[in-house]
Image: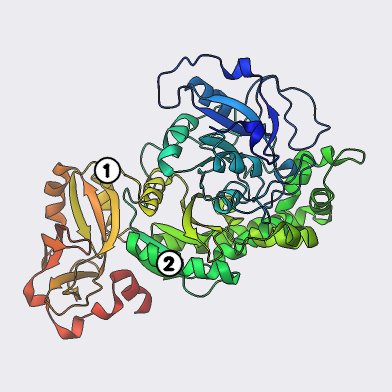
Amino acid sequence: MKAAREIGQPAFITLLDEDRVREPSTSDGPLAGVPFAVKDNIDVAGVPTTAACPDLTTPASESAFAVRRLHEHGAVPIGKTNLDQFATGLVGTRSPYGTCHSAASVAHVSGGSSSGSAVAVALGVVPFALGTDTAGSGRVPAAFNGLVGVKPSRGLVSTRGVLPACPSLDCVTTLTRTVTDARPVLDALIAHDAEDPYARPMPALLPAGVARRMRVVAVPDGPLDLDPEHAQAWTAALAHAAAVGQVVRVDVGPFLAAARLLYEAAFVAERLAVFGHLLEEGRQVDPTVRQIVLGARRFSGADAFSGLHELARLRSVAKRVFAGADAVLLPVTPGHPTLAEVAADPVGANSRLGTFTNMANLLDLCAVAVPAGQRPDGLPFGVQLLAPAFADGPLLDFAARWTGEPVEPPPVRTLLAVAGAHLTGQPANADLVRLGGVLHSRGRTGPGYRMYTVDGPFPRPGLLHTGDGPAAGIEVEVWDLPQAALGALLPTIAEPLHLGPLGLDDGSTVLGFVADTGCADSTRDITAYGGWRAYLAGR
């Protein structure tokens, strides 16, 4: 581990006393004795929480809930890290303690606001660091420094003891070199804090529609506004996505529209409400931070409600993407600006960096930023995987498969492939849920299958392996059921459907709803739609 004082960057605002760092660990778990850094908007007992404002000098009376959780698991904080002042920025340049740069280039920004935390990990000072992520402040510096940045679902990690930016959106996040490194840290951090008004416990079961094993990733159905070097790296990332899982193309317009709300609508006024009083004249406040936050005075109460209504509309539209996909893949940023470019246009350059990150907490998504190789100029390139709230575990597994790290397979009971009325959101899906079924994965049949409409008590399709079906297969969901559930399900299956072996696109064979051979009626062939949902939508 490199000495924190010898890294040649202002990554740290405060280093803890060596005697304190050397306190013996009382844990024998995976974090016992592991050093970590703490973003300086998170309390560490006895140390001022400056949020990069030197006028804030009062030592914290106790450590933040997240820091105490890590300490209980044996991890050892070594210092407080630099940040964009009051966690308002995605560039890493808005600090009177100095400007961090990317670990890969002295000319390019480190990303913020968790700039010092990212640099400390990237340069090998600590194996992991805590950051925060309200608008992308953990994911952007992760992408610019070749790291993994995990933004859990809102409320899973308590923000008690964090100097707030936007309390309804703030998240404590982790920065590590690998997904494997992040797992024990998150295991320690995720615990319900009854004293945090925004805390939410992890549900005992995955939410409806969230698969245990994620396979289907949604990508934009059109070009994105990316800098040329970023665009080339994004093309390579899309090819990698097709190798890791199954790719579907979707309209990400609602996601990008929600991202614009964070600073272009009244949501920015939450910052004014919680720390506007700290921006008074005479304090050492970054002028851009003051401009952004105090500029929120122009919004009215009516503006706030208009923003909430628009967000509700966009959230409703955006969540439809997850009916047919496990996660959304996006670049973390549109480009990687230089320090000079940010100095020339501090607001515009920063605003552009949030194009793909600002929406995550507004839309109640969890997210993981992962390395995706390098741009042609050698700078790190990062992408992010986004999924619905509380899909954190499966999303972390998907991120591990992206990076080529090991993933422990989920326990298997009985797997059943469904293609019609039992799909998530369809009329018979409640039967699977009532019997204890959980969504295992999304996928497609193997080649050679055709789909036909069949008679029955409600509209439904049947699958037949005719040998001449499309090579790309037909959309299915695979459900994980208790053994006893099959016996209870059988009486509900009306002819001409029955359970039989069904080949999947990953080469496996599971039980599935298949049709009798007499159903091969060309007038009822709906194979061209590619799946039951598409047929219903296009009918």
Question: In which quarter of the view is residue 238 placed?
Answer: bottom left
Of the residues shown, which amino acid type is indicated by label 1?
A: Pro
SS assignment at label 2: helix
Determine whether, in the image, residue 503 is placed left or right of residue 429: left
Do callouts 1 and 2 mark residues in contact (Cβ within 8 Å)?
no
Real-space CA distance between mark 1 and mark 2, rounded to the nearest whole angstrom? 26 Å
Q: Position of residue 347 (x, y in %)?
A: 76, 59
Q: Which mark is residue 410?
A: 1
Residue 254 coordinates in the image, percent (x, y)? 56, 65
Q: Residue at x 42, y 33 (%)?
A: 184
Residue 78 or residue 27, whichever sits in front = 78
Question: In the figure, 3 relative to 286: above or below?
Answer: above
Q: Amino acid at mark 2?
A: Leu
Q: How far across and down, in percent of the image, does residue 178 sit?
A: 44, 43
| Circle 2 crowding by C-alpha within 10 Å: few under 14, some 14–19, many from 20 | some
Residue at 46% across, 60% down: 329
Which residue lies under the disc numbered 2? 238
Please, is residue 439 above or below residue 411 in the view? below
Q: Nearer the viewer, residue 450 or 67?
A: 67
Task: Provide the secondary structure element on which disc 1 rests.
Answer: loop
Vertical arrangement, residue 85 with respect to residue 304, above or below: above
The mark tally for this picture is: 2
Q: Is residue 253 visible?
A: no
Q: Is residue 448 above or below residue 106?
A: below
Q: Based on the displayed image, in which of its 4 quarters is residue 500 positioned? A: bottom left
